[in-house]
Image (cartoon, rainbow, N blue to C red):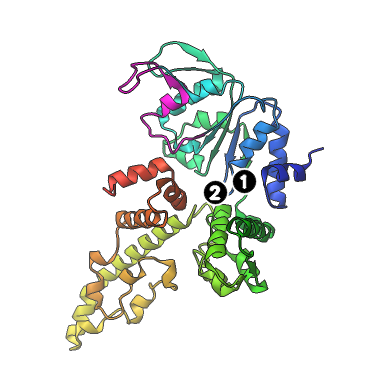
Amino acid sequence: MIDLQTVKQRFGIIGNSSLLNRELEKALLIAPTDLTVLITGESGVGKEYFPQIIHQSSARKHGPYITVNCGAIPEGTIDSELFGHEKGSFTGALSDRKGYFEVANKGTIFLDEVGELPIATQARLLRVLEYGEFMKVGSSHVQKTDVRIVAATNVDLQWAIRNGKFREDLYYRLNTVPINIPPLRERTDDIYLLFRKFSSDFAEKYRMPAIHLTEEAKDALTKYRWPGNIRELKNITERMSIIEQNREITPEILKTYLLTPDVDNLPAVISSDNSTFKNERELLYRIIFDMQRDINELKKLIPGMVQNAVSQDVSPVAYTTSTPILKEYEPQEKEQVPYADEIKEENKPLTSLMSSKQMPSLEEVEVEMIKNALERNNGKRRNAAQDLQISERTLYRKIKEYGLE
């Protein structure tokens, strides 16, 4: 008989969701085997706990347990990190080095962000999975290893396969046992339990009374979408614990900390199927692209509008952003579209608004988001990458590409 409550207490897992319990039971059932496991779920749902549960509940629990963040290792060195290298195999290889697969023999390796692995490294990983063997960088000697692999990703690997970014054969080999961690918005009964736990922890950490919510604030807490899942809830609870002098949190206070403050009037598109928009960043891009398309359509109308104005002896300046034709395309909430000030300018002529300078390009949006994330996290790139829900390697590449170093 599986005692889920004991497992939850041991690993600090909070919640009674049936979806979460089902995945926990699956992890405990397959733990005694050596089956490869693929853990999927959005960023911030707590995927990192499941490999520990599997390892500690297996016969390998006395062997090594190594966590590898595949997205944080530069592409040029990841093969050396995983498989080791021989002395002189590349510039800087001053001595032989053991890789993680050699060090973790008889244990478990957790490959976090496995979707970020380069294609060449994926081929080498597939050989480890199929035959339990690998070669160090710069060596022709085949070595054996007895390692259980647990992988995790928040990337849609089916999409990555279709776009040539992930090997289909590796996907099926990793996906022997799939475990999908539900997002926080599908565990509404657990949201307040998690908030109380975090509130109590931070009260103890900072030696101050714990914050608590009014009934209305509890309702707002559970209605919010939580795109950053448990990580976002924890960060918001910590900020409120430090900043708010009034320990009773009202809906008005709570909403100032939320990404989408108006939880009672969330756009319908946000609550749509998650396969349409994987995160809020994609939603922002879609809004901007749609508005760019609409503005391009409006540009085509300008010559006729101006000609009509001239024929009726009306100044073209009269066609401003206050005319009904443009208001149809204005965002409903300024906070939901970070570039609303550039898109909506009440007193400028329509012809001025149509200038390409008024609509930020995708690159400009990305640069601004990266700058803001780095500023929020005091230049710490790992935290900024988590904030943006991208891998550290992707963030490094973007910083170099846009000259933000």
User: Which residue sits at x=21%, y=82%?
Assistant: 317
| Residue 367 drawn at (x, y percent) | 32, 54
Which residue is situated farthest in the front direction here?
A: 207
Which residue is situated farthest in the bottom direction here?
A: 313
In the picture, the quarter occupied by the N terminus is top right
* Residue hosting label 2: 42
Pointer 1 or 2: first along the chain: 2
Q: Quick check: is 92 in the magenta stretch?
A: yes
**Which is more toward the observer, 109 or 125?**
109
Residue 63 in view: yes
User: Which residue sits at x=56%, y=24%?
Assistant: 104
Give the CA distance from mark 1 to mark 2: 8 Å
- Compared across the picture, whether 94 is left or right of 310 comes to right
| Residue 296 drawn at (x, y percent) | 29, 65
Q: Quadrant of residue 342?
A: bottom left
- Compared across the picture, whether 245 is left or right of 404 comes to right
Contact flag, marks 1 and 2 (Cβ < 8 Å): yes
| Residue 335 drawn at (x, y percent) | 43, 69
Amino acid residing under circle 2: Glu
Residue 178 in view: no
Q: Main secondary structure of the magenta part?
A: loop
Above or below, 259 relative to 352: above
Which residue is situated farthest in the right direction here?
A: 1
Amino acid residing under circle 1: Ile
What residue span does the magenta drawing correspond to?
Answer: 68-95
Q: Secondary structure at mark 1?
A: loop
* Residue hosting label 1: 181
